[in-house]
Image (cartoon, grey):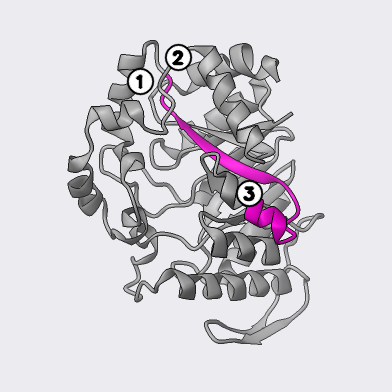
Amino acid sequence: MPEFGFALSSELHRPNELVEYAAYAEEVGFDYLTISDHYHPWISEQGESPFVWGTLGGVAQEIESIPVATGVTCPIMRIHPAIVAQAAATAAAMLPGEFSLGVGTGEALNEHVLGDHWPEHEVRLEMMEEAVAVIRKLWSGENVSHHGKHYDVENAKVFTLPDETPDIPVSAYGERAANTAAEIGDGLVSVGPQEDVAATYDDAGGEGPRYAQMTLSYADSEGEAVEAAYERWPNTALAGELSGILPTPKHFEQAVQMVEKEDIAEGSTVTDPDPDTHIENVQQFEEAGYSHVTLHQVAPDVEGVLDFYAEEVMPSF
């Protein structure tokens, strides 16, 4: 049976709203939460992008025991891994349930803001491996000095540590990243039911939960859902590597001019309000090897979709 999570979408909501949605998701029976870590939204219409570590402090005060994970943090450029280690340790110490630091190689949209060169994916994978090693060293509570290829840490010690060291699930969308996730991570993070990614992760000896995000636009009718996704989340229909290399919301707004409503209706975003459609989609995630299905609602009615899943979908599993 899969676990059901809800994605707190920092690109679509203000921080206090995210805190309220976190508490409501726990109240209606969701198993875990994730929260995105962005500097920018994809497009200006989305409108928000609060600092994840501040928002998590608010979430910690409103939930009782539900696990929370970042989905995902890029610890390689915008924030030095030594600072990520301290931020994540503080969040884990505050949150009443388990906290996991989901990590990935990021997108130029968020990581270019300090003016650093945006390296190719192979280099970013190498940076992420070293960053995760630095974070784990600092979570030991020991005094750490590290002088590596990409990062330097000098006489640093994280004093505020949680009772349990957080897991670090790793994001992957292809074979090489899936192998890296199996090597350095405590779980896999992906989007859509990408069976090949989960299989590669398993073949490489990966252990821990396998998270996959399912984007949906839930509304009273399919037409309303398509309209909402087209206005608020057209970037999901962009093909290829554009999502990783475009640097600003303005560039994404230019790119999504290629997207038509038909692309949304025929794409991966779930827009049909029929419970059977959602049940079938969750089953596809299960069959592809994912133990955790994270729902990402891009339409405005957040409480409505939480109620819908709690009453109409989750009982089937």
Q: Is residue 61 in view?
A: yes
Could you tell me which secondary element the residue under label 1 belongs to? helix
> Residue 299 location in percent, x, y?
38, 25
> Residue 294 location in percent, x, y?
58, 36
Q: Nearer the viewer, residue 165 or 19?
A: 165
Q: Amino acid at mark 1?
A: Ala
Please check the rendered image and state whether residue 213 is part of the magenta-colored stretch, yes or no.
yes
Q: Which residue is mark 1?
A: 225
Could you tell me which secondary element the residue under label 2 belongs to? loop
Q: Which residue is mark 3?
A: 198
Mark 2 Cα shell of 10 Å, populated few (<14), some (14-19), many (≥20): some
Question: Which residue is at a point 72% across and 52% down the rendered structure image?
Answer: 93
Q: Which residues are magenta?
A: 199-218
Q: Quadrant of the N terminus?
A: top right
Mark 1 Cα shell of 10 Å, populated few (<14), some (14-19), many (≥20): many
In the figure, 308 relative to 48: above or below? above
Mark 3 Cα shell of 10 Å, populated few (<14), some (14-19), many (≥20): many
Could you tell me which secondary element the residue under label 3 belongs to? helix
**Label 3 vs label 2: CA separation?**
28 Å
Question: Which residue is at a point 50% across and 20% down the rendered structure image?
Answer: 305
